[in-house]
Amino acid sequence: MATVSWHSLPAMFFEQAERFREKPFLWAKQDGVYRPITWGETAERVKQLARGLQAMGLQKGDRLVLVSENRPEWLIADLAVMSAGAITVPAFTTNTVADHLHILTHSGAKAAIVSTRHIARRLLPAALEAPDLQLMIAIEDLDVAQRRFFSTVSWAELEERGRQENGAIDDLVAGLKRDEVSCFIYTSGTGGTPKGVMLTHGSIMANCEGAYDLLESFGLGEERFLSFLPLSHSYEHTAGQFLPIAIGAEIYYAESVEALASNMREVKPTIMTAVPRLYETMHQRILRDVRKLTGMRKWLFHKAVELGRKQYEQADSLTLWERLLNWLCEVSVRKQVRARFGGQLKAMVSGGAALNYEVGVFFLALGVRLLQGYGQTEASPVVSANPPARIKLKTVGPALKGVEVQIAEDGEILVRGECVMNGYWCDPEATARTIVDGWLHTGDIGFIDEDGYIQITDRKKDIIVLSGGDNVSPARVEGFLTLQSEIAQAMVHGDKRPNLVALIVPDADFLSGWAKDHGKPKDLNELADDPELHKTLSGVVDRVNRGLSNLEKVRRFIIAREPFTIDNGMLTSSLKIRRHKIKERYGPDLDALYERG
């Protein structure tokens, strides 16, 4: 595969669609059964929608906001917008009205596509206030009140309009250039107001080429991707949509995160992309199931983890007896674990945040190949990833083909290559601060080891500087805390203070069991100040502290009154914690911990 021969993302898609015309491409559940749409049918629907959008007045360079769950129409809409010469602006379905209004207004969107009545409830109020919005397209029927709320056209009507038009979509696609902007992807807002990252056709295709170069070592063939991370996130947009197009793979759309386990068994994906939070959840669920085992089955599971870990950390170190045991673990334990993921996974790729080393080793030890990567929206988004042949879990691997990485004097990771964004929309000052002499300043701190692998130590802005001048990585400490089965989420605090304190969200299953055993209410808000619960969790924190340096130890903590969620603004849509939002709510309580003597 050589994406350099393609001048745009639609050109890449249409060429692949012609090549695989009658083969199944997009799979979605209908009446409880996965049903396919072929490459050829998808291409025809893209052209129809593109002509329909043209007929409704969408012109080259116009922006269209796309708000939908993952489904075939998402891909069709994205490619239709680009084929018409316009720019897609994906937005998370979990956005608030204020989030939607910011994106609609800031991008100057002329049109928007929304999928369902439920999702429209938060988009339509924002659409009424957006100054440039002229057209709303509904994939599914909106109710009467919503149709009155805003003038809309249905997806079916737009496709029909496209069938009746003779717009020269092929000519438009032929005229697209590699360095033209294809989409704006808004940052998740971990540090404040989201910024519109301008990605080009070439930046995304360069990412696909680098990913292909990484993955072809394990033999790419007829691949199946299971898409469940939001397509509005640059990670899934590139790795879960355009990479499958580039390699001619099939895409299955998961029904929901809750149905992910059953979908994996059903679909049998060969490649999956996910954020660390998913792997952490899977890790805890597997261990929870293991606790219910007894006798030889339980012993074999733990032996599989022990021997698998030893094999990873000390290559060729197993004794003859251990090799025999390892074979037994392979057929009786690891095969069953892989079956939970469908049984045909070649690799799971972790990105979007740091993967806890213990979680990574756990899966590798159980025979599930897990590749940690690194990137950010401004790099389309992948910068590096561990190659399948040599996985170093404490790193994020070497830079992808076509990507240059160097370390600045202050330790910041700098990136250069075609994958780097064109800049932030309508924000030349932020662009000038972020891209200097062609180098993207990532805001991440790290180093490059002797093998050329990148190791990230922290976010430049997130580093805690204690009052004694020592630097501490909050992400590292939080990772150890959330690895405990009793803790679901955590944030540590301590900038300009003598030591660290923490805010802890107990695991829901642990809390339910604990409350039942102690005759307490199960409501977290009521239990946050409970001294018995605090005492139990103190033992968990002490357990973590034993493995940390003195500077990293959590000296005191408080219990949150509710989990960090997207709805309460404490999590981004990509499941990263919003430190500034959490501090707005809990800052005074955390500061009070230092006044207790």
Image (cartoon, grey):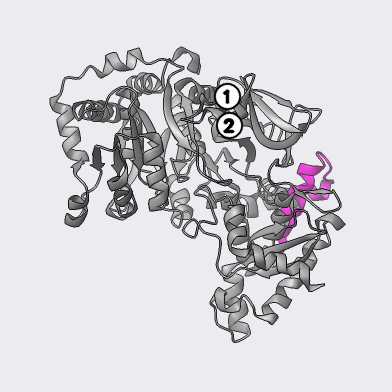
Disc 1 to disc 2: CB gap under 8 Å: yes
Residue ID at (59%, 87%) = 519
Residue 436: within the magenta? no
Q: Secondary structure at mark 2?
A: strand
Q: Secondary structure at mark 1?
A: helix
Residue 333 occupies quadrant: bottom right
Q: Amino acid at mark 1?
A: Gly
The quadrant of the rendering that contains the C terminus is: bottom right
Q: Look at the image and tell me whether residue 222 can be seen.
A: no
Which of the pair 45/345 is nearer the observer? 45
Q: Counting residues from the N terminus, which is met first, the one under dot 1 or under dot 2?
A: 1
* Separation of marks 1 and 2 at Cα, in angstroms: 9 Å
Q: Position of residue 474 (x, y in %)?
A: 72, 52
Residue ID at (62%, 58%) = 583
Which of the pair 561/485 is nearer the observer? 561
Magenta span: predominant SS is: helix
Residue 525 occupies quadrant: bottom right
Residue 73 occupies quadrant: top left
Q: Amino acid at mark 2?
A: Val
Which class describes the residues within 10 Å of circle 1: few (<14), some (14-19), or many (20+)? many
Residue ID at (47%, 49%) = 264
Q: Residue furthest bottom?
A: 519
Q: Is residue 130 left or right of residue 544?
A: left
Find disc 1 in the rendering and name its residue: 210
Camera-side mark, 1 or 2: 2
Looking at the rendering, the stretch of residues picked out in magenta corresponds to 299-324
